[in-house]
Image (cartoon, grey):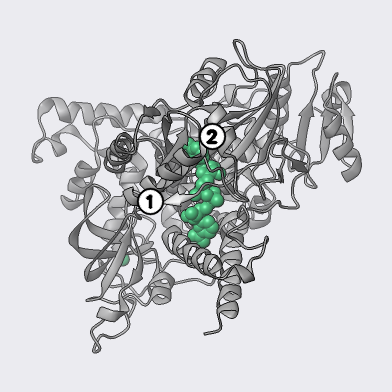
């Protein structure tokens, strides 16, 4: 094939992947595949310097600036890193370093955090701005979003320089990521793919209040500026820690490639114990004077090298596909695999998400499949080894009937999942709903666990959650593993749950798409279950954050007589099905549907009180002004940028007194 054509084709392909990855946060190929394509291009360009192009993906940092934020030029360029995958490559790098740098060379070994890069500028000890890497020369100013991250210090301690940039990575720790996904699944939405893309996507959200809800972390690793008071990278890390930054403590000094390899091998094995994702380690020449001698290529520093861990992939046999029925009747396909070692654990099952996913990847029983472990606890199948496919295998037929009760499955337009609608008679749904009802974030019934619920249903002692409130000690005592004391505890726990507040009862009812947050929102707007029951689809949709799907689901729920009877019974047992007097005090829906931004300081109320006033009266407070903002409440010393933006967008600007008059 024509070399020039091949080179151009690779460049175009890589540009598209860069765009998917950095701008859309939705990569379509694995990082490993991307790195291999880039390497292929690099080799071709080296062999054929006549086709050199300064705009080639080998010569440029991959990101871009977006149009949604102010574009800011970096005081100091932000670079990418050169990659290596083996000890040999590390040794070759050491040879090059020693040729260019004067004197003994020492290295700092750091973890390579997998998130989105950020540059923070501090002036006189205060955070001035936060800018994404962008194309390395200029990036997006996302200060308002970064300020919501608790580990980013707004004011520094100690002997910091007058002005400097500090670089780091915004990451989403596994735990927070799993929590966010659990909530999304609960609300019937597709889970996020992995922590890296979710962290990166979070920075680009327009509403800082949304960003604040995400458990992001900012890990710092490098200081740049004039007249710095330290002479090595390692000291720089220590200084940053002293000034108040979050600098992970794993970094170590190494004197040779052998010592570097020890660090690499240790973390290749043990990185799964870290709370966040890492995709390798970064080795840096420790001495800053030597760093200066070494300088930069067009794309990366010569004084640093990333060593990438091998992709966490394994190939194994897909023995069978089975289907699970959740408490809402949602069907999840599960891949049962021949046991295989992956990322330090034995994997036997993988998620297949839904029918589309199976069809898209053409996954079939008996296939050899590639399994990957991202941020999720359950690994996923990312592809099929088609070379090994049995020529007689047939495409997977998604089930049409519920595996538990035989009812025909339904998949509504626009829904990713199939559902079994036999809510009342499908055993896992019956048990699942009661298990959800008693769970910690719902009614939190002490002395009663999921297993016992299943047992009570099996023994025909309960059929639904209302039945719990009629249970007698004498009925449960004969059950397996039930003693006098545990039976008493169980009954007492059920009794105690009668004081659980309305919003949690609402969540406990298990209405499809009504997760914890939605339940809170609904309880605020419809302060009793009767009000909610009488709400029309339209009234529901008019509530902030309540979309068509949720509204429909609520209306459907109350449209079913059985559900209304259950609620009637819960009322009679004395559960909290409306907001208490205390909660209601000072509340109204005067500001319903209005969005506010608060700026500056106020005379009569604190910012916190102001925020509460807005929310208590049905309004919403966000961090930054956008086209959706109705009012800017302006106090003393308001930020000039907010004012300009409000004026530009025609947002109504009101004073403290004008606001107080409104409520
Ligand atoms: N799958 C895809 O479609 C796709 C597309 C584009 C890029 N990618 C992935 O992204 C990589 C390229 O991204 P890149 O240019 O950001 O390079 P990189 O991620 O390989 O390395 C540079 C980045 O590492 C980060 N980093 C983390 N810890 C660090 C530390 N301790 N010290 C210094 N830097 C640290 C910094 O943000 C820095 O910008 C590719 O190797 C590929 O794996 C994938
Ligand atoms: Zn069923």
Tell me the number on the disc at residue 565.
none
Q: Going by the image, does 662 lie left or right of 448? A: right
Question: Which percent across, then down, holds residue 440?
Answer: 35, 35
| Residue at 59% across, 33% down | 292
> To which quarter of the image does residue 32 belong?
bottom left
Some atom of ligand 2 lies within 8 Å of the CB belonging to the residue at label 2: no
Q: To which residue does mark 1 refer?
A: 89
> To which quarter of the image does residue 131 belong?
top right
> On screen, 191 above or below 33?
above
Q: To which residue does mark 2 refer?
A: 578
Q: Secondary structure at mark 2?
A: loop
Mark 2–mark 1 distance (CA, rounded to whole Å): 67 Å
> On screen, 15 above or below 547?
below
Report the front residue among 217 and 573.
Answer: 217
Total number of numbered discs in the rendering? 2
> On screen, 116 above or below 538?
above
The answer to whether residue 24 of the structure is visible from this angle is yes
Q: Going by the image, does 515 lie left or right of 19? A: left
């Amino acid at each position: 094939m024509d070399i020039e054509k091949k080179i151009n084709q690779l460049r175009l392909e890589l540009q598209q992947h860069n765009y998917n990855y950095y701008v859309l946060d939705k990569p379509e190929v694995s990082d490993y595949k991307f790195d291999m394509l880039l390497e292929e291009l690099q080799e071709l360009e080296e062999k054929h310097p006549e086709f050199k192009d300064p705009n080639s993906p080998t010569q440029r940092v991959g990101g871009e600036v977006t149009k949604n934020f102010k574009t800011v030029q970096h005081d100091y360029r932000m670079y990418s890193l050169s990659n290596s995958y083996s000890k040999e490559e590390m040794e070759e790098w050491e040879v090059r370093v020693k040729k260019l740098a004067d004197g003994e060379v020492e290295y700092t070994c750091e973890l390579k955090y997998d998130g989105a890069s950020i540059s923070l500028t501090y002036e006189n000890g205060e955070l001035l701005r936060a800018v994404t890497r962008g194309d390395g020369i200029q990036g997006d100013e996302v200060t308002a979003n970064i300020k919501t991250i608790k580990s980013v210090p707004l004011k520094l301690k100690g002997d910091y320089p007058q002005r400097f940039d500090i670089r780091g990575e915004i990451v989403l720790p596994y735990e927070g990521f799993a929590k966010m996904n659990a909530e999304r699944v609960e609300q019937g939405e597709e889970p996020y793919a992995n922590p890296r893309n979710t962290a990166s996507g979070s920075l680009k959200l327009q509403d800082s209040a949304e960003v604040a809800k995400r458990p992001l972390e900012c890990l710092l690793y490098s200081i740049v500026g004039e007249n710095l008071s330290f002479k090595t990278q390692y000291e720089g890390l220590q200084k940053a820690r002293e000034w108040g930054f979050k600098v992970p403590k794993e970094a170590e000094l190494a004197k040779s490639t052998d010592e570097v390899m020890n660090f690499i091998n240790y973390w290749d094995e043990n990185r799964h114990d870290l709370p966040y994702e890492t995709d390798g380690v970064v080795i840096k020449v420790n001495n800053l004077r030597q760093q200066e001698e070494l300088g930069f290529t067009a794309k990366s520093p010569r004084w640093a090298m990333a060593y990438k861990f091998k992709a966490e992939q394994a190939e194994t046999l897909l023995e069978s596909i089975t289907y699970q029925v959740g408490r809402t009747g949602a069907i999840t396909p599960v891949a049962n695999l021949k046991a295989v070692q992956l990322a330090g654990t034995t994997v036997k099952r993988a998620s297949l998400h839904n029918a589309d996913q199976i069809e898209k990847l053409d996954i079939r029983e008996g296939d050899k499949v590639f399994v990957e472990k991202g941020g999720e606890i359950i690994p996923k199948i990312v592809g099929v080894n088609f070379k090994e496919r049995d020529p007689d295998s047939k495409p997977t037929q998604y089930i049409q009937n519920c595996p538990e009760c035989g009812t025909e499955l339904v998949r509504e337009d626009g829904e990713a999942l199939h559902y079994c609608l036999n809510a009342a008679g499908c055993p896992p749904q019956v048990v699942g709903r009661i298990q959800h009802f008693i769970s910690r974030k719902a009614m939190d019934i002490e002395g009663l666990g999921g297993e016992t619920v299943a047992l009570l249903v099996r023994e025909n002692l309960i059929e639904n959650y209302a039945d719990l409130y009629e249970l007698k000690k004498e009925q449960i005592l004969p059950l397996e593993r039930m003693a006098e004391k545990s039976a008493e505890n169980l009954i007492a726990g059920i009794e105690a749950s009668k004081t659980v507040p309305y919003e949690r009862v609402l969540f406990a009812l298990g209405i499809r798409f009504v997760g914890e947050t939605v339940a809170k929102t609904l309880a605020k707007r419809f302060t009793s279950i009767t009000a909610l029951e009488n709400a029309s689809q339209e009234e529901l949709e008019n509530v902030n954050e309540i979309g068509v799907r949720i509204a429909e689901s609520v209306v459907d729920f109350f449209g079913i007589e059985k559900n209304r009877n259950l609620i009637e019974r819960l009322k009679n047992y004395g559960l909290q099905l409306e907001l208490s007097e205390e909660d209601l005090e000072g509340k109204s829906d005067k500001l319903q549907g209005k969005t506010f931004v608060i700026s500056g300081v106020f005379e009569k109320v604190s910012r916190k009180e102001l925020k509460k006033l807005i929310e208590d009266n049905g309004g919403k407070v966000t961090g930054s002004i956008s086209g959706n903002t109705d009012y800017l409440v302006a106090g003393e010393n308001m930020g000039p940028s907010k004012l300009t933006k409000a004026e530009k967008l025609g947002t109504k600007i009101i004073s403290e007194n004008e606001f107080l008059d409104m409520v």
